[in-house]
Image: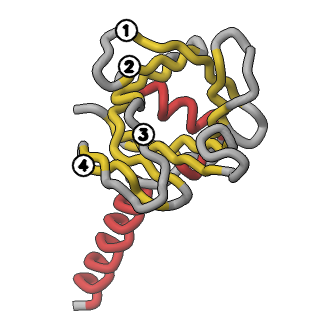
């Protein structure tokens, strides 16, 4: 009887550890980059503006007084050579950006290095099947600062 209880307890511990490790976030920017480049294509899942969801389940959700996005990347690819490419809704040509590792996170910015805007991907926001990239800018609602978060899921 004691042997059976110990066996069941050990099985539960091992199963729990396995389940917990399956959907854990990346611990470092390097691990985040490995997870991002392991997936061939990512598909947009959600857009949040100032913490309010404005796009989910393939539909725009109008928020009173919020910014309305008509142009967004439906799919993106993160390549090992530092290229971040995305295809905007309704278009077929890829838009190219670059990604690079920093000591704290991954940054995504213009491929030519020009411009001031950049997106941030924190390791804690990267999992094997999803990631979130964020930016802040006054360009959308000057002079107020706007925070935008794009959540992508692995394309099936």
Which residue matches tag 2?
87
Q: Are marks 4 and 3 in contact (CB under 8 Å)?
A: no
Q: Is residue 81 visible?
A: yes
Q: Residue at x 35, y 61 (%)?
A: 19
**Disc number placed over residue 126 in the picture, else none:** none
Q: Nearer the viewer, mark 3 or mark 1?
A: 3
Q: Residue 105 vs residue 61: left or right?
A: right
Which residue matches tag 4?
57
Residue 118 pos. (x, y %): 67, 31
Which residue matches tag 3?
69
Q: Residue 119 vs residue 66: left or right?
A: right
In depth, the one of 4 and 131 nearer the eye is 131
Q: CA distance from mark 2 to mark 3?
A: 15 Å
The numbered mark, 1 or 4, whose residue comes first in the sequence reads 4
Residue 64 location, quadrant: bottom left
Q: Are marks 1 and 2 in contact (CB under 8 Å)?
A: yes
The numbered mark, 2 or 3, whose residue comes first in the sequence reads 3
């Amino acid at each position: 009887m004691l042997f059976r209880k110990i066996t069941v307890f050990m099985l539960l511990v091992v199963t729990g550890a396995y389940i917990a490790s399956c959907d854990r976030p990346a611990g470092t920017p390097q691990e985040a980059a490995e997870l991002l480049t392991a997936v061939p294509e990512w598909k947009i899942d959600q857009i949040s503006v100032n913490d309010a969801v404005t796009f989910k389940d393939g539909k725009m959700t109008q928020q009173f007084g919020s910014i309305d996005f008509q142009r967004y990347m439906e799919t993106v690819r993160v390549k090992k050579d530092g290229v971040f490419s995305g295809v905007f809704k309704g278009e077929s040509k890829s838009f190219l950006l670059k990604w690079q590792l920093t000591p704290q996170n991954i940054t995504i910015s213009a491929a030519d290095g020009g411009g001031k805007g950049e997106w941030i991907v924190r390791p804690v926001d990267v999992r094997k099947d999803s990631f979130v990239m964020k930016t802040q800018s006054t360009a959308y609602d000057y002079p107020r600062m706007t925070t935008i978060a794009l959540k992508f899921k692995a394309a099936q």
